[in-house]
Image (cartoon, helix red, strand yellow):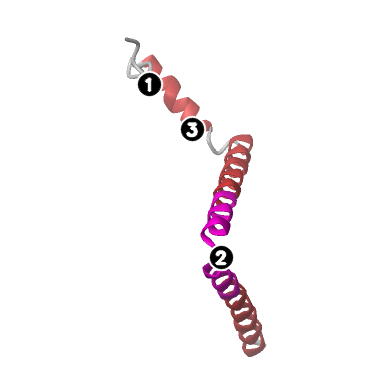
Amino acid sequence: MCRRAAQLYYSRYNMLMSRVEEIERAIQELSQDEFAQIAQRFHALEQERWDAELDRDASSGKLDFLIAEAREDRKQGRLRDWPEPE
């Protein structure tokens, strides 16, 4: 059974790698304009995923410690306005 599981793992790994390699080859064949469009879209997708992860973390309470730290810093006088008023 372990041997079969290992075979399945490596089979899926190879399929994934060939898919990634296929995408990499396609990207290398893009014109500069097409590459710029893909790069811009990739950056936007990355930001969307980051925002979604941040929302999930905030909703689940994973970031509550930051609020507690900020409240303690304010109580201790360690919090300043940023940017500093001119």
Which amino acid type is shown beneath numbered disc 1?
Answer: Asp
Spot occupied by residue 61 in the image (x, y as percentages of width and height): 59, 35
Nearest-to-viewer mark from 2 and 3: 2
Judge whether 68 appears above or below 51 on screen: above
The image quadrant that residue 84 belongs to is: top left
Query: Viewer-proximal residue, 51 or 43?
Result: 43
Classified by dominant secondary structure, the portion drawn in magenta counts as helix
What residue is shown at x 32% (from left), y 19% (from top)? 78
Q: Quadrant of the N terminus?
A: bottom right
Judge whether 37 appears above or below 13 on screen: above
Which span is picked out in magenta? 21-41
In 3D space, how far apart are the residues under numbered discs 1 and 2 (Cα atoms)? 51 Å
Could you tell which of marks 3 and 1 lies nearer the N-terminus?
3
Which amino acid type is shown beneath numbered disc 2?
Answer: Leu
Could you tell which of marks 2 and 3 lies nearer the N-terminus?
2
Nearest-to-viewer mark from 1 and 2: 2
What residue is shown at x 53% (from left), y 32% (from top)? 64
The image quadrant that residue 82 belongs to is: top left
The image quadrant that residue 26 belongs to is: bottom right
What residue does disc 2 label? 30
Judge whether 75 appears above or below 49 on screen: above
Spot occupied by residue 24 in the image (x, y as percentages of width and height): 54, 70
Spot occupied by residue 32 in the image (x, y as percentages of width and height): 51, 59
What residue does disc 3 label? 65
Spot occupied by residue 55 in the image (x, y as percentages of width and height): 62, 37
Callout 3 secondary element: helix
Callout 2 secondary element: loop
Query: Viewer-proximal residue, 17 or 56?
Result: 17
What numbered label is drawn on residue 73? 1
Q: Are marks 2 and 3 in contact (CB under 8 Å)?
A: no
Is 57 in the magenta?
A: no
